[in-house]
Image: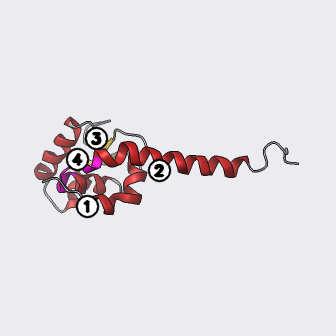
Amino acid sequence: MTSPILIGKEEDLKKSEAVLGNALGDMVHAPEIDGLSSMQKEYLLAMTQGDGPSSTGEIAKRLERNASYANVYRTQLIKKNVIYSPAWGQVDFKLPYMRDYLREHGAYHFLHSSKE
């Protein structure tokens, strides 16, 4: 039998997570992304196609660019503290939930407020 104290708590928790996720996105992720160039945004969007650390070679393939070209943007994003390298030949998002945010809002940020 389910405890009366727990009835509805899971639903409340899911609602809270959604609200907090949106707040994190609006206050942290959006400003971070808005300050990036179109190619830097493309690099990040290419990273969202996987669920964990991304292979830098695979990102270059997704971008349809050579590894040297993609590495320029990898280096820029590392310097901006948007991504980091957890292992040789891999990158991952530095900010928690950035992948989820970009999966949901990436197209908007790519089409709007590009800094060239």
Mark before the other along the chain sequence, 4 or 3: 4
Q: Position of residue 70 (x, y in %)?
A: 16, 51
Q: CA distance from mark 4 to mark 3?
A: 11 Å
Mark before the other along the chain sequence, 1 or 2: 2
Q: Which residue is mark 4?
A: 35
Task: Give the residue type at disc 1.
Answer: His
At mark 4, the secondary structure is loop
Disc 3 to disc 2: CB gap under 8 Å = no
Q: Which residue is mark 2?
A: 22
At mark 1, the secondary structure is loop
Query: At x 33% / y 58%, what residue is drawn?
Result: 106
Query: At x 72% / y 46%, what residue is drawn?
Result: 9
Mark before the other along the chain sequence, 2 or 4: 2
Q: Residue furthest right?
A: 1
Quadrant of res 48:
bottom left
Q: Which residue is mark 3?
A: 82
Q: From the viewer's perspective, is residue 30 above or below residue 80? A: below
Picture disc at residue 112: 1
Task: Give the residue type at disc 3.
Answer: Val
Query: At x 18% / y 52%, what residue is drawn?
Result: 37
Q: CA distance from mark 1 to mark 4?
A: 11 Å
Mark before the other along the chain sequence, 3 or 1: 3
Mark before the other along the chain sequence, 1 or 4: 4
Q: CA distance from mark 1 to mark 2?
A: 19 Å
